[in-house]
Image: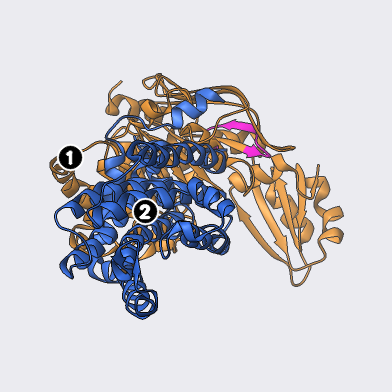
Amino acid sequence: MSQDQKHQVLKRKLGPEDLRRFETPAIERESHGQTSAKSSVPDSLSTVAVDFAGVTKSYGNKIVVDELSFSVASGECFGLLGPNGAGKSTIARMLLGMTCPDAGTITVLGVPVPARARLARRGIGVVPQFDNLDQEFTVRENLLVFGRYFGMSTRQSEAVIPSLLEFARLERKADARVSELSGGMKRCLTMARALINDPQLIVMDEPTTGLDPHARHLIWERLRALLARGKTIILTTHFMEEAERLCDRLCVLEKGRNIAEGGPQALIDEHIGCQVMEIYGGDPHELLSLVKPHSQRIEVSGETLYCYAPDPDQVRTQLQGRAGLRLLLRPANLEDVFLRLTGREMEE
Amino acid sequence: MIEGFAAALPANAWNWVAVWRRNYLAWKKVALVSLLGNLADPMIYLFGLGTGLGIMVGRVDGASYIAFLAAGMVAVSAMTASTLETLYAAFARMHSQRTWEAMLYTHVTLGDIVLGELAWAATKAFMAGTAITIVTATLGYAAWPSVLYALPIIALTGCVFASLAMIVTALSPSYDYFVFYQTLVLTPMLFLSGAVFPLNQLPGAFQQIARCMPLSHAIDLIRPVMLDRPISGIALHVGVLGLYALLPFFLSMALLRRRLMR
């Protein structure tokens, strides 16, 4: 299926709100944003890039990854979403063959891992959670040295460095030391470094953690540029917004288990299916009894009442005349899904 | 388990060069300072002890004390240079800078990294030891040209102590633990290996212990070539040094694999 055909198919599947998103200037969004969320794995991208089957890993008595199964199609952006400690980084390490699973099988780019991890890594680029660039080297030297780890000669690396610098928007910083770069620039360089071996698969572990909003948007934009080039991306994150924006599909992790899997919008529709009204400024427990008859589900978190209401106007009417209340009506998002699935302070 | 260990071994005979070159590039940026730092300590010992004690001691084994000491200091400088590189610098690359982690994303295996680090530490030992050899030979404390035979032994000594220090690096939770190895292993070895005084001054039991120490075998090879004397038991000395280089390499690999790839 060509990009245009795919575009048409997607348009047919989408509602008016999705179409507005579709028309936004977000770069190269056509085949990879939330827009494709409703289809599970795009038909044209049936090759499996990564497959985890019943993978378990524990450290001592602590089970970090529990009977985890998922597969990622070539060309898609797959998210591993979960709070800190959900096992995201361990999954990324197992995928790279840097740690062995206790049970289950892992296949990456058609190669069994960890048995043939070195061969698999030939086709993988990694953007780690913690910056591990060589601080004392210049931007160019970092790329050159990293190319050598893949057996690339200086000449081979120098041939690709200009395009990598362009990708990272670091053309003018080629001879600057890494220690002189901002956090966003460093992360861009790490992304460029991950591309030196022209990988098919890019593993990004918390790529925007610790970055300011401006840098975060830059990284997202660069990430979409990679998807437009047909790269497969595995993204671990605890930012719901990031997952919602970027991932074609994602799997929600809790204590190393896959508790839900699907496209972001599909998950929102399936688990929430209506708008959310946030109510704050009053005693949430008192308000709860008032709005309960008109809500599908209510959740109290701190002093805020989250009201999942099919008809928000009825809730509004119930609360009319009460002073000091603030109401915010918003579309449901992945965070709502996550809270629902992990069940924090919830009341059905 | 065995399969996992095999996967962590060096991938081929040349992959480690990329790791060595990374360290060389970093070193080039601070080469002068690094060289002076590595040279200052053994030079001060050589001339401080050599001239000071030399007056009291007179001749040792038929050579001036300073010429006797020079061979010891060459071996000790190789030992110190490669130990410090592997303990502090390699530990930083493994632990705080996460350089090894970045390497492990690539075609390089853990074995390649360890081998590259050992080769680099041995290179630094070679540079330090060679510089002192040149100085002592220039001042007439070492015989020319037999002193040239000392160079490969210096490199081998560097390998031995890098390899041993890699075990400490693999086991240490933090930098603070390195001092135990330095004070409880290296310092006694300095006095038990004939670096500063002849071994036959020691009681018999200590002489036996000394024969197990890698430093004494290095000195037994370096001293005769620097003083242009015949060497006895070359094969034994080289064999012991070879084992000291090889066995800790595999042991440290296994320990590092347990530490980094669990």
B54 and A140: which one is in front? B54
Rounded to the nearest whole Å, what is the CA distance between mark 2 and mark 1? 40 Å
SS for dot 2: helix
State which mark lies toward you, 2 or 1.
2
Image quarter in which the N terminus of chain A is found: top left
Question: Which subunit holds the residue at mark 1?
Answer: A
Residue A168, x across and y down, in percent: 27, 52
Magenta region includes residue A262: yes
Left or right of A75 on screen, residue A14: right
Identify the chain drawn in orange: A
Residue in view at x 20 percent, y 67 percent: B135
Q: Nearer the viewer, residue B124 or A91?
A: B124
Identify residue type, mark 1. Ser
Q: Is residue A321 above or below residue B97?
A: below
User: How would you rate the neighbour count of disc 2 (Cα within 10 Å): few for under 14, some for 14-19, many for 20 or more?
Assistant: many
Label 2, on which residue? Answer: B219
User: Percent position (x, y) of residue B160?
Assistant: 40, 46
Q: Which residues are magenta?
A: A253-265
How far across and down, in percent of the image, does residue A334 sit? 59, 44
Q: Which chain is blue?
A: B
